[in-house]
Image: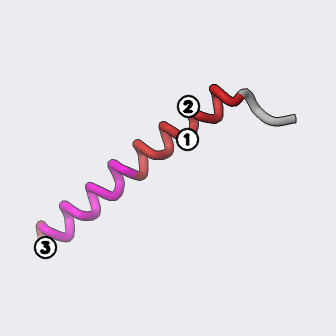
Amino acid sequence: VLADPEQQVDQMASLTSYWGGFGSLVVSTRHGL
């Protein structure tokens, strides 16, 4: 049984925002060095 599509989309959105913030942090750190 698949999970609730709406819940899955919400989980994907939170994951995307998490990795987006992590990526920007890495980029800013590299430019800082």
Q: Is mark 1 on a helix, strand or loop?
A: helix
Is 23 included in the stretch rendered in magenta? yes
Indicate which label's residue lies in the foreground, 3 or 2.
2
Is 32 included in the stretch rendered in magenta? no
Position of residue 14 in the picture relative to residue 23 (left or right)? right
Corner quadrant of residue 8? top right
Please say if the residues under marks 2 and 1 sit with CB atoms less than 8 Å apart: yes
Task: Residue 10: give its label.
Answer: 2
Dot 2: few (<14), some (14–19), or many (≥20) neighbours within 10 Å? Answer: few
Q: Position of residue 4 (x, y in %)?
A: 73, 27
Q: How is colour applied across the structure in the image?
A: secondary structure
* Placement of 1 over or under 22, stated as above or below: above
Please name the residue that numbered disc 3 is placed on.
Answer: 33
Could you tell me the amino acid type at mark 3? Leu
- Gap between marks 2 and 1 measured at Cα: 5 Å
Task: Residue 4: give its label.
Answer: none
At a point 81% along the width and 36% down the height, the residue shown is 2
Please name the residue that numbered disc 1 is placed on.
Answer: 12
Residue in the foreground of this view, choosing between 32 and 15? 15
Q: Which span is picked out in magenta?
A: 20-31
- Gap between marks 3 and 2 measured at Cα: 35 Å
Q: Is mark 2 on a helix, strand or loop?
A: helix
Q: What quarter of the picture does the N terminus occupy?
A: top right
At a point 24% along the width and 64% down the height, the residue shown is 27
* Placement of 25 over or under 30, stated as above or below: above
